[in-house]
Image (spheres, rainbow, N blue to C red):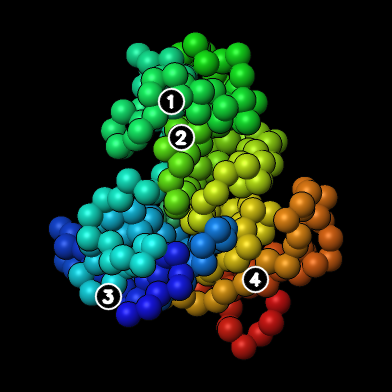
Amino acid sequence: MENTSHIELRDVSHTFDTDSGPLHVLDKLSLKIEKGSFVAVVGPSGCGKSTLTRLVSGLMIPQEGEVWLGGNIVKSPRSTVGMAFQNPVLLEWRTILDNVLLPLEIVKTSLNQKQREDRARELLALVGLEGFEDKRPSELSGGMRQRASLCRSLVHRPEVLILDEPFGALDAFTREDLWQIMHELRREEEFTCLLITHDLRESVFLADQVIVLSARPARTQYVLDVKLGDNRTLEDLYTKKSVDMLADLRHQIQVAQGRASDEVAA
Ligand SMILES: Nc1ncnc2c1ncn2[C@@H]1O[C@H](COP(=O)(O)OP(=O)(O)OP(=O)(O)O)[C@@H](O)[C@H]1O
């Protein structure tokens, strides 16, 4: 069947077996993400957002429905996916450069050692870590470690970048720095991005589209097209357009949490 989306979930349902019985997490979840777009997923705590990232990356296979990536059904972990999480999990016994190089030791590549290092150094320079290549992770701040983690997730030029709350543990100012670095990375690198976040401002600043999931079992409840330009700045978050979008999203989250009616516009 023809498939024009880069990432697509078709009627995906999943139930975990837990000590207290079956836990129905996703219920006929369907969504489409176009190639090169940046989509943020928000929703109530525990609704199944991380489960969604595991399905897209092939770390898990759904019990029902299909996950498509680049025109193929996902049946196993995919090397064309890069991932970054809230905890950067850098290896302390490796330098920052060697941490960034790690995926190129695992994924098949035609690059020789010099080309690999050039690629890693290019990314580190892009995120402002030039001069820190030989440091150990513990010598860097939390924000710098997360920047290195982003480089590691992109070093093998994945087609899809999955970010699961990567900025959630950072202070507000560092988080905003990282948001701007994400825009810089997007200008320089080619990838389709799926971001999981609890931060509505982050979703509006970074994404082309924000998908609101319902409470568990999650379904797509609402989709917001973010009508800000590609060259958006932090100041744009304080314009009426952004404030209205944020109010809309906040209302949808309240609906998902059962704290508001979906008949009332925010
Ligand atoms: N392997 C598993 N086995 C059993 N239960 C699981 C498993 N993985 C996740 N869960 C449960 O499924 C539910 C959804 O988990 P998931 O991590 O996808 O939610 P989330 O929306 O990312 O949560 P949060 O917003 O808190 O980060 C949670 O109740 C979680 O405890």
User: For disc 1, does the CB lie below 8 Å from ligand 1?
Assistant: no
The earlier-in-sequence mark between 2 and 4 is: 2
Residue 225, numbered label: 4
CA gap, disc 1 and disc 4: 37 Å
- Name the residue carrying label 2: 155
Q: Are there few (<14), some (14-19), or many (20+) residues within 10 Å of tag 3?
A: some
**Tags 1 and 2 in contact by the CB under 8 Å rule?**
yes
* Residue type pointed to by label 2: Val
CA gap, disc 2 and disc 4: 29 Å
* Residue type pointed to by label 4: Asp
- Name the residue carrying label 1: 116
- Asked which secondary structure carries label 2, the reply is loop
* Residue 239 x %, y %: 84, 60
CA gap, disc 3 and disc 4: 26 Å
CA gap, disc 3 and disc 1: 38 Å
Q: Can you say which quadrant of the picture contains the N terminus?
A: bottom left
User: Which of labels 2 and 4 is toward the front?
Assistant: 2
Q: Residue at x 46, y 42 (%)?
A: 157
Query: From the viewer's perspective, is residue 26 above or below residue 17?
Result: below
- Asked which secondary structure carries label 3, the reply is strand
Q: Nearer the viewer, residue 180 or 82?
A: 82
The earlier-in-sequence mark between 3 and 4 is: 3
- Name the residue carrying label 3: 65
